[in-house]
Image (cartoon, rainbow, N blue to C red):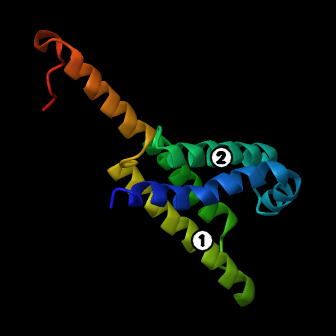
């Protein structure tokens, strides 16, 4: 069952890593869409969010700073849902597509918040560094070992 954590991180992070690259590869087209949605500073919004998505996705995938990355991605997802996927007041066919994107972002933000709460799990860089610290502490004489935190 421990293998589910890295598999879940891989599947969850894949869309963010891909989307982050996409923000840089197709930045001009995305800026046009951001302008049409009324975002101020569309270049900053597109490239800044590209960095958040790419770095956040890699951090989640590797399990390093995963909680911080998940907070950043959750904030991005909610902001994107509220600014880019405003389905209310649109014609029915367009509203249906935007509503799907809106709720997809909201549900992924919920998944990111679960990652914030539970952490990256086993087989992560964070878990590996904790194991190494525990091994190093066991090698120390008993008087020099750190006391367990309660």
Instruction: Estimate the x, y position of residue 12 in percent, counting from the top left.
Output: 53, 60
Instruction: Estimate the x, y position of residue 132 in percent, counting from the top left.
Output: 34, 28
Residue 79 visible within the image: no
Kind of element beneath mark 1:
helix
Q: In this image, 148 relative to 113: left or right?
A: left
Which label sits on residue 54?
Answer: 2
Rate crowding at label 2 as few (under 14), some (14 to 19) or many (20 or more) other CA atoms within 10 Å: many
Q: Residue furthest bottom?
A: 92
Where is residue 14, by image quadrant? bottom right
Q: Residue at x 70, y 89 (%)?
A: 92
State the separation of the CA atoms marked 2 and 1.
20 Å
Residue 75 visible within the image: yes
Residue picked out by circle 1: 102
Instruction: Estimate the x, y position of residue 75 in percent, counting from the top left.
Output: 53, 51
In primary-sequence order, the first of circles 2 and 1 is 2
Q: Are marks 2 and 1 in contact (CB under 8 Å)?
A: no
Q: Residue at x 17, y 10 (%)?
A: 144
Rate crowding at label 1 as few (under 14), some (14 to 19) or many (20 or more) other CA atoms within 10 Å: many
Q: Quadrant of the N terminus?
A: bottom left
């Amino acid at each position: 069952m421990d293998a589910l954590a890295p598999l879940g991180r891989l599947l969850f992070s894949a869309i963010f890593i891909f989307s982050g690259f996409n923000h840089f590869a197709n930045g001009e087209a995305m800026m046009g869409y951001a302008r049409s949605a009324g975002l101020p500073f569309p270049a900053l919004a597109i490239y800044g969010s590209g960095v958040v998505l790419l770095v956040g996705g890699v951090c989640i995938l590797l399990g390093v700073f995963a909680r911080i990355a998940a907070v950043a991605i959750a904030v991005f997802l909610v902001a994107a849902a509220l600014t880019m996927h405003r389905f209310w007041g649109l014609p029915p066919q367009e509203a249906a597509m935007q509503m799907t994107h809106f709720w997809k972002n909201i549900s992924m933000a919920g998944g990111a918040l679960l990652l914030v709460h539970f952490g990256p799990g086993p087989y992560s860089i964070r878990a590996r560094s904790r194991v190494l610290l525990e091994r190093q502490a066991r090698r120390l004489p008993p008087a020099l070992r750190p006391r367990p935190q309660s």
